Amino acid sequence: MNRQASPFDVPRWIIFILAMGAGFSVAAIYYAQPLLPLMGSDLHLTVNGMGLVPTLTQAGYALGILFLLPLGDRYDRRTLILVKCAALALFLLACSLTSHLNTLLVVSLLLGMAATMAQDIVPAAAILAPEGKQGKTVGTVMTGLLLGILLSRTVSGFVGAAFGWRVMYQLAAASIAFIGVVMWAVLPRFAIHSTLSYPALMRSMAQLWGRYPALRRAALAQGFLSVAFSAFWSTLAVMLLDRFHLGSAVAGTFGIAGAAGALAAPLAGGLADRVGAAKVTQLGAALVTVSFALMFALPLLSTQMQLVLIAIAAVGFDLGLQSSLVAHQNLVYSLEPQARGRLNALLFTVVFIGMAAGSALGSKIYTLAGWPGVVALATVSGLIALGIRLAAGSRRGAVANIG
């Protein structure tokens, strides 16, 4: 296929295919979490051994974001997406066949790196978007990505319980192979925006970070929102067991509630196209903060109403986080279109740091201060993100008045 990417002749269903690709690929790094007891029993792993599987997968994803995403500015994105897709399918299949912990850990690391194809797909969608529709297009693809994150645990838990953990990985490999064939058939080629060598490409990322205050504000604000998001999801199952004596299956249903919020992301993208991405980041950060603050009222409610409020909060903060992320990506991509791969890598490196910090802090604070402590951490993180976005808006207003 020699056709070049054009923002004027790309059907909507191709964007839907990209959303599916983003969702399936990012889901690959979360399938293991509900399957760990089954994997541990089958491979005779200790608790620490089981914990290393998702840790290495997440580490691989972080390494892939930092060291592989910049290649999107140097090579045809279609080629990169398809190569990673083939590698991810093979690594998922290899996971299903392994019988030793060390092999499983190595494959998990490589699987995480290949799963970053999700982050190659998002800027590809921005390139394909028609003029004035970039926010809505990126929002659609990001909805697929977030649904992959939120629903992967639920799907793998049910499949693992019914058919075993190896079958889940085999089905995942088949899904990636299928979406890869479809993308090979429909994706156009993308223009190459840089001729820099790989070392120069990596050095240029530091220059981009220093050159654009808007990039730093976007990354830091989204990073703090990620702290709140991760703190909640990393402690929810433990809290439900301790407080309500509910199992992991119920925790998975809250993922479905969060997914309902994610489905509204294309609306947020469309709103960003109309009123400006900066305004949507403020609204998103405010919604995250308010949603978490509502949970301070949990002790005043009956048991049933507490669960309802947690579900409502999950819908609210997932919508706020997703809306803010789509808007931040719009802001970042517009800074230097020929450097979208590197800008995306910088944004998501900080987001990932926020996710890791939220998980670590959430678990620690839950041990020390219980669920109210986790709610306080999430609320404060949301307030910091909101402060960053409001300060950015005030700065732009001051510049406009001077002008």
Image: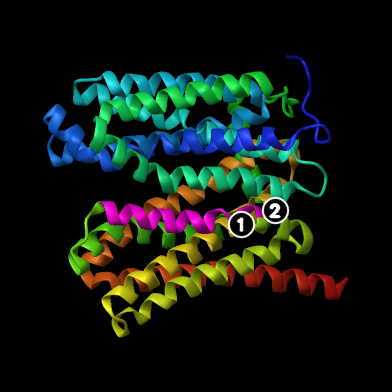
Indicate the position of residue 196 as horizontal and vertical percent values: 68, 26
Could you tell me the amino acid type at mark 2? Leu
Label 1, residues with CA under 10 Å away: few <14, some 14-19, many ≥20? many
Q: Please, which residue is most extreme toward the top here?
A: 1
For label 1, the residue is 218
Tell me where the magenta segment starts and ends, as one range.
Answer: 249-266
- Determine the image quadrant of residue 162: top left
Q: Amino acid at mark 1?
A: Ala
Please state the horizontal and vertical placement of residue 50, each as a whole percent of the image: 20, 37
Question: Which numbered circle lies on residue 331?
Answer: 2
Circle nearer the N terminus (2, 1): 1
Residue 91 located left or right of residue 372: right
> Mark 2–mark 1 contact, CB under 8 Å?
yes
Label 2 residue SS: helix
Question: Is 226 part of what is drawn in magenta?
Answer: no
Q: Is residue 265 magenta?
A: yes
